[in-house]
């Protein structure tokens, strides 16, 4: 698969996965990879608390206003990563402004009346967010929008709410908006979902279930599956520490030998577990797959984001 | 309640609330604490929200029954488990507080009400606490361990009762139920504009549903408010303990710190900190240089271990003097009673 083709095949990429699988990291890696191809990508986060800024060396949390996280990333100094937050409240206030209710929107929000509406019309908050994302996809000055979808079990609800609402609302602007979102989500030329998981039992089960539910209920295009945190293979790990030390002419104590041995055993066991889960994943989900390496650093900063973007590009090229 | 070890809480507290972000092993930890309680001869019940399938199977939770099921095992006490069904817990609550069966039926049938358990944020948290109250106050359990829902807002489970009461007392819609001229003036121009817009954008039936709902609910707010106050009081009782569960990953620790701070703001003490999936140190012998992949592996893994330490140090100080329990990486995911026993051994 050609990387620049991947980055420009749809103008919207939705990154989805359970909490803790590294969804935001993968969002950052995709945006960064696209920027390295000379594109302008926009990261949109909807959870209101992702640490995506830090992955580009920016400590400030994202706000409604767009910021540039990285510039001049591609050949000839073109290519940018931008980012902004978009919470349901932001989208709602903007929607009300657009519908001539700007002055009263905040006061009504604080009266709790909006809670009643949001409860009476489940999914309305998701539609407001996705409607705004659609607007960015259609009109935005960027080449690629990368949406960091809500965590936990929310991803499926988030993406199916449009169809439910289009069916439920009989008429009116919300129905129009829901239909436009359904159209976007089911158009493989405009939008794709990148599912992220870890090579562990529960995340594997969940990603398989999410993939089938999304395909069945939303008819959304599933891009390659990203498996995060795969331990890189080390060829020399199976060797006996004492013989290696003897060969290298290094003096080792018995404490050192047992530390080396225990660490090698630990890594072996974890790698075996990961391999087993990767096999299960392959059997149960026939999707193209890209594996990203486990990073032995504590935090994901700009250099780590670069490493992951590179690994992602390499993985995509190999497909 | 002060304790030297987290396991002491399972032997002494009446309620243990496990909180923390998603994906850190909260459900498993809650189940292991309940096993500890049963081992100590107590009648213990674990309330879970969304267990992984194999653990649910091991606990006999193949379906949402909303009543505790007994788990047989090698303990002197009793172990019960329940998977929370938000909708039917709410239904029970409505039925209990309604003046007449007709009033209950009218509410249960309302479309707005039927959406509430799925769509009103905080409802699941509130029902978890409601179930906890019911089991602890009326179920005859010595120990109830509850696993809080993974939520974006750290304190949803504490704030939910108040938020729901506020929702049920919604002024705008209550005033609409008596639409005399004077009341309409009280509702105000902005509200009328708002309601007109709501009718226009999402349909007039939405407003009609809401009005019917609040009409049916008339007279029940008091009962709900009292119940919410009782639940809140129980959560703040000295026999209720809060255990913070986390992993040593920087994002989890960040959330745990946020959680601990918020709990402190609400005058709630963290009684124990459980850190799952801690990396091993492999002893203290310095890594020998020049042994290729073997050296590299030991160095890399130890870097993870010291990063764990660094991340956890501040958190431990924040919750001091609460005991800190480190549960190492286990070779297998926990999906049976033997696995719970392995975790229990570290508590």
Image (tube, coloured by chain):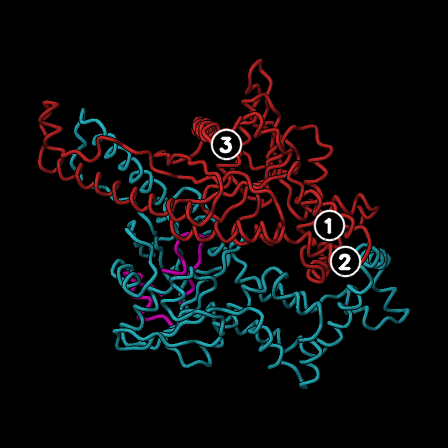
**Which color is chain B depicted in?**
cyan
**Mark 3 or mark 2, which has the lower sequence index?**
3
Inter-mark Cα distance, 3 to 2: 38 Å
In contact (CB < 8 Å): disc 2 and disc 1: yes
At numbered mark 2, what does the secondary structure look like: helix, strand or loop? Answer: loop
**At 27% across and 63% down in the image, what residue appears?**
B338
Q: Quadrant of the N terminus of chain B?
A: bottom left
**Which color is chain A depicted in?**
red
Q: Magenta segment, which residues?
A: B1-28
**Quadrant in the picture for residue B228:** bottom right
**Mark 2 or mark 1, which has the lower sequence index?**
2
Inter-mark Cα distance, 1 to 3: 30 Å
**At 44% across and 65% down in the image, what residue appears?**
B48
**At 44% across and 33% down in the image, what residue appears?**
A300
Parent chain of label 2: A
Image vertical order of residue B101 relative to residue B319, above or below: below
* Whether residue A174 can be seen here: yes
Residue wearing tag 1: A178
Q: Is residue A135 magenta?
A: no
Inter-mark Cα distance, 2 to 1: 9 Å
Residue wearing tag 3: A29
Q: Is residue B12 magenta?
A: yes
Residue wearing tag 2: A169
At numbered mark 3, what does the secondary structure look like: helix, strand or loop? Answer: helix
């Amino acid at each position: 698969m050609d990387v620049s083709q991947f980055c420009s095949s749809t103008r919207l990429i939705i990154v989805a996965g359970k909490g803790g699988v590294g969804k935001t990291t993968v969002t950052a890696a995709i945006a960064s990879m696209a920027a390295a191809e000379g594109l302008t990508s926009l990261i949109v986060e909807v959870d209101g608390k992702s640490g995506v800024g830090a992955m580009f060396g920016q400590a400030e949390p994202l706000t409604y206003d767009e910021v540039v996280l990285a510039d001049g990333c591609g050949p000839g100094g073109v290519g940018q990563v931008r980012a902004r937050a978009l919470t349901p409240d932001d989208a709602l206030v903007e929607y009300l402004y657009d519908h001539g209710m700007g002055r009263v929107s905040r006061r009504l929000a604080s009266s709790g009346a909006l809670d009643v509406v949001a409860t009476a019309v489940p999914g309305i908050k998701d539609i407001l967010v996705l409607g705004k994302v659609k607007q960015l996809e259609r009109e935005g000055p960027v080449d690629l929008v990368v949406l960091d979808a809500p965590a936990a079990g929310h991803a499926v609800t988030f993406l199916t709410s449009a169809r439910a609402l289009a069916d439920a609302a009989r008429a009116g602007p919300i129905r129009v908006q829901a239909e436009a979102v359904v159209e976007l989500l089911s158009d493989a030329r405009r939008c794709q979902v990148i599912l992220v998981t870890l090579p562990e039992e529960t995340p594997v089960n969940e990603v398989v279930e999410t993939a089938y539910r999304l395909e069945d209920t939303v008819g959304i295009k599933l891009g390659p599956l990203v498996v995060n945190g795969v331990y890189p293979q080390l060829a020399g790990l199976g060797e006996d520490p004492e013989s290696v030390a003897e060969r290298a002419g290094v003096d080792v104590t018995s404490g050192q030998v047992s530390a080396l041995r225990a660490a090698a055993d630990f890594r072996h066991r974890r790698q075996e577990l990961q391999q087993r889960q990767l096999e299960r994943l392959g059997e149960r989900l026939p999707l193209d797959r890209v594996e990203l390496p486990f990073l032995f650093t504590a935090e994901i900063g700009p250099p780590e984001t670069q490493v992951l973007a590179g690994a992602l590009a390499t993985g995509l090229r190999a497909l | 309640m002060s304790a030297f070890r987290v396991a002491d809480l399972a032997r002494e507290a009446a309620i243990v609330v496990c909180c923390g972000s998603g994906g850190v092993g909260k459900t498993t930890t809650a189940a292991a604490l309940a096993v500890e309680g049963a081992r100590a001869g107590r009648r213990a019940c674990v309330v879970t929200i969304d267990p992984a399938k194999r653990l649910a199977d091991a606990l006999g939770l193949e379906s949402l029954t909303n009543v505790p099921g007994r788990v047989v095992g090698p303990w002197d006490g009793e172990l019960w488990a329940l998977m929370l069904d938000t909708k039917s817990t709410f239904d029970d609550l409505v039925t209990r507080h309604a003046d007449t069966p007709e009033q209950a039926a009218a509410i249960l049938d309302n479309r707005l009400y039927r959406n509430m358990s799925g769509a009103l944020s905080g409802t699941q948290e509130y029902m978890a606490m409601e179930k906890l109250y019911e089991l602890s106050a009326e179920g005859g359990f010595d120990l109830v361990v509850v696993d809080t829902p993974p939520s974006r807002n750290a304190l949803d489970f504490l704030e939910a009762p108040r938020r729901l009461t506020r929702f049920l007392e919604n002024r705008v819609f209550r005033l609409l139920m008596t639409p005399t001229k004077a009341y309409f003036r009280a509702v105000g121009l902005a509200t009328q504009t708002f309601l007109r817009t709501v009718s226009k954008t999402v349909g007039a039936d939405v407003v009609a549903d809401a009005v019917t709902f609040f009409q049916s609910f008339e007279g029940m707010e008091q009962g709900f408010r009292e119940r919410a106050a009782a639940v809140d009081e129980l959560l703040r009782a000295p026999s209720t303990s809060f255990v913070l569960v986390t992993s040593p990953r920087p994002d989890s620790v960040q959330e745990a710190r946020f959680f601990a701070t918020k709990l402190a703001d609400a005058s709630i003490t963290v009684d124990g900190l459980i850190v799952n999936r801690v990396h091993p140190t492999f002893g203290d012998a310095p890594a020998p240089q020049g042994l290729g992949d073997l050296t590299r592996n030991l160095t890399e893994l130890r870097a993870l271990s010291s990063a764990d330490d660094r991340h956890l140090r501040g958190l431990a100080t924040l919750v001091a003097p609460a005991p800190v329990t480190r549960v190492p990486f286990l070779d297998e995911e926990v999906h049976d009673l033997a696995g719970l026993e392995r975790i229990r051994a570290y508590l």
